[in-house]
Amino acid sequence: MKKIIALSTLLALSALGMACGDGGANTAANTNKAVANAMNAAANAANAAANSAATAANSVATAANSVANAANATAANKPAASNAAAPANSNANANHK
């Protein structure tokens, strides 16, 4: 917001200089416009870089979710472990001494 106010002020002063009008004021106004344009270009480049970083982060998050989903699907399809006790040996002879 501060950047927008600063740039608006700069452009308003440039317009005032052109309206009052000698050649020096017009040159200064054009210089100020060039500075404002350069600042906007830098801000746009920074925003583009931030957007690229956000896109990369989203891609990583999507890949992580895919891996987690695959792991969950594998675990869901695995047969449950059996808790049944092994049968006792029924061939034991109670009369054996």
Image (cartoon, helix red, strand yellow):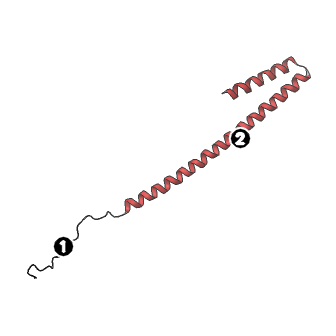
| Above-or-below relation of 55 to 92 | above
Left or right: 70 as drawn, with respect to 45: left
| Above-or-below relation of 71 to 57 | below
Q: Position of residue 91 (x, y in %)?
A: 15, 79
Instruction: Name the quadrant containing residue 78.
Output: bottom left
| Above-or-below relation of 88 to 43 | below
Amino acid type at circle 1 is Ala
Residue sitting at 74 percent across and 27 percent down?
7
Distance from label 2 to label 1 (Cα)? 76 Å
Residue sitting at 75 percent across and 37 percent down?
41
Most extreme residue toward the right is 23
Q: Position of residue 63 (x, y in %)?
A: 53, 54
Most extreme residue toward the left is 95
First along the sequence among labels 2 and 1: 2
Instruction: Name the quadrant containing residue 32.
Output: top right
Instruction: Name the quadrant containing residue 81.
Output: bottom left
Left or right: 22 as drawn, with respect to 66: right
Residue sitting at 63 percent across and 43 percent down?
51
Task: Categorize mark 2 by other alpha carbons within 10 Å: few (<14), some (14-19), many (20+).
Answer: few
- Disc 2: which residue: 45
Helix, strand or loop at mark 1: loop
Q: Position of residue 28 (x, y in %)?
A: 86, 26
Q: Nearer the viewer, residue 95 or 5?
A: 95
Q: Position of residue 60 (x, y in %)?
A: 56, 51
Residue sitting at 23 percent across and 70 percent down?
86
Helix, strand or loop at mark 2: helix
Amino acid type at circle 2 is Ala
Quick one: quadrant of the N terminus? top right
- Disc 1: which residue: 88
Most extreme residue toward the top is 20
